[in-house]
Amino acid sequence: MRSKELQARLSEQKNREVVHPFGDPQFGDLATPINTSHWVRTYLNYLPAVRQGLTPLQRGLEVGMVHGYWLVGPFARLGPLRDSAIANLVGFLCAVVLVVISTFALGLYALSNPPAPIAVTAPDAFRTSGGWSRFANGFLIGGVGGAIVAWLVLIGVGLFGKG
């Protein structure tokens, strides 16, 4: 008898509909004018991580190139060797090391059998660990390539800036 009563209560609770008023922060929906606007959602859907029509390797290349490119400058100009002759080289090497560490972290995340993202409409590749692994491979190649480009730009600015 007790199990039938328990099952009846559970099915009754399952069938109830819970409705929370929109925009009430007490319910934790965190809807703000920024994250609910059409413009912000459109911008987020055009980021390479969720843009439709790209393979995981292409996504990783694009994200990696951006990260590798912008990491060289802060290491070269704000690091402890910023006033030395090898500041650009040290900035490049530090950026490459950070990209390798980040790739290792992405690889570990891929091995953890990650859950499917729910905040945005994610591509199917991010629903499997193989897709995350291909993304990490692209991130490594793109990150090192972006760091090389930034290092070459800094060398070129140094050569032509002192003339």
Image (cartoon, rainbow, N blue to C red):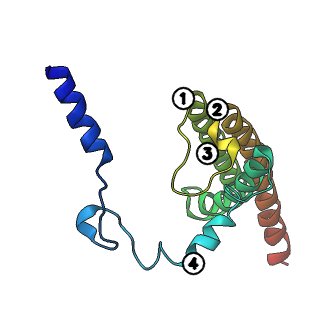
* Nearest to the observer: residue 2 or residue 81: 2
Residue found 65% across the figure and 63% down from its top? 73
Specify the amino acid type for callout 2.
Ser
Mark nearer the viewer, 4 or 2: 4
The residue carrying mark 3 is 98
Q: Residues within 10 Å of mark 3 (few under 14, many from 20)?
A: some
The residue carrying mark 4 is 38
Per the model, the C-alpha gap separating discs 1 and 3 is 21 Å
Mark 1 or mark 3, earlier in chain: 3
State left or right for residue 124 relative to residue 101. right
Q: Do callouts 1 and 3 mark residues in contact (Cβ within 8 Å)?
A: no
Locate residue 142, reporting x and y percent.
Answer: 77, 49
**Element assignment for label 2:** helix
Mark 2 or mark 3, earlier in chain: 3
Residue found 19% across the figure and 21% down from its top? 3
Mark 1 or mark 2, earlier in chain: 1
**Element assignment for label 3:** helix
Q: Quadrant for the N terminus, please.
A: top left
Per the model, the C-alpha gap separating discs 4 and 3 is 35 Å
Locate residue 93, reporting x and y percent.
Answer: 69, 46
Mark nearer the viewer, 4 or 3: 4
**Element assignment for label 4:** helix
Specify the amino acid type for callout 4.
His
Q: Which mark is residue 112?
A: 1
Determine whether 6 is above or below 60 in the image.
above
The residue carrying mark 2 is 129
Mark nearer the viewer, 2 or 3: 2
Mark 4 or mark 3, earlier in chain: 4
